[in-house]
Amino acid sequence: MRNGCGWPREWMVRVSSTPAFVSRMEHTHGRRLRRFLSMRLRDAAADVPDLVQEVFLRLLRIKDHESIRNPQAYLYTVALHVLHQHTLRSSTRPTTALPADMAEDMDSFLADDDPAEEAELEDRFEKLGAALQAESPRAYMTLLMYRGEGATLEQIGERLGVTRVMAKKYLVKALAFCQQRLAEGY
């Protein structure tokens, strides 16, 4: 029998160590997490094992895993952040015209090899993605589908249940939001 968090009742005993917590998360949710990521990376299914590994590595960095109220929700939130960062880094397809300053800023961010700068960049992308998702979840998903999956506006419209024109508006909104936040030094 399971509770609302997706944990079997017999597992509700507090897990004493972070590695044990992550091991249980992988045992309980690993297969569904792989399927979740595979569905979102149809054209890049070879990247799924790396993304799953990154999700669990991030969980290993948690110092106080006992404070997580809903481990399943937390796991998928981390997975969405990892997916978002992967999407931004692996996207080589140009979007609608980006301002030259924004494109140069993003290129300079992505070119750094310094681990400290990469960690800072990762944090900035997470915050930018979270802010966009809070501002407009549909604009956020449109940007992920367009840049990460290479979906067309027609495909995005179908998946979101909107017209192509509305999907384009969501994309423009997402790009404008990112441009504004980057200009503010977000």
Image: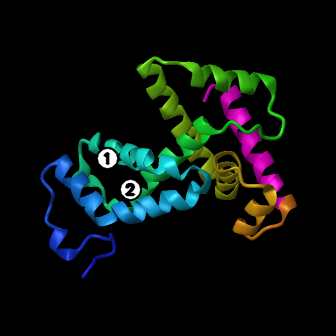
Looking at the image, which is closer to me, 100 or 64? 100
Question: Could you say whether the residue bearing mark 2 is in a helix, strand or loop?
Answer: helix
Q: Position of residue 66 (x, y in %)?
A: 22, 54
Which residues fall within the magenta stretch? 166-186
Label drawn at residue 75: 2
Q: Earlier in the sequence, mark 2 or mark 1?
A: 1
Q: Circle 2: is it few (<14), some (14-19), or many (20+) Cα within 10 Å?
A: many
Res 158 quadrant in image: bottom right
Q: Amino acid at mark 1?
A: Leu
Residue at left offset 18%, top offset 68%: 12
Asked if the residue at tag 1 contacts the one at tag 2, i.e. Cβ–Cβ closer than 8 Å, the answer is yes
Residue located farthest toward the front when viewing the structure as drawn: 46
Magenta-span inclusion, residue 46: no
Name the residue rendered at 53%, 32% in the picture.
124
In this rendered view, identify the residue nearer to me: 44 or 165.
Answer: 44
How far apart are the two marked residues, 2 and 1, measured between alpha carbons?
8 Å
Residue 115 lies, in percent from the top left, at: 42, 21
Q: Is residue 81 visible?
A: no
**Residue to which mark 1 is pinned:** 59
Quarter of the image containing the N terminus?
bottom left
Is residue 82 rendered to the left or right of residue 89? left
Q: Is residue 154 left or right of residue 45?
A: right
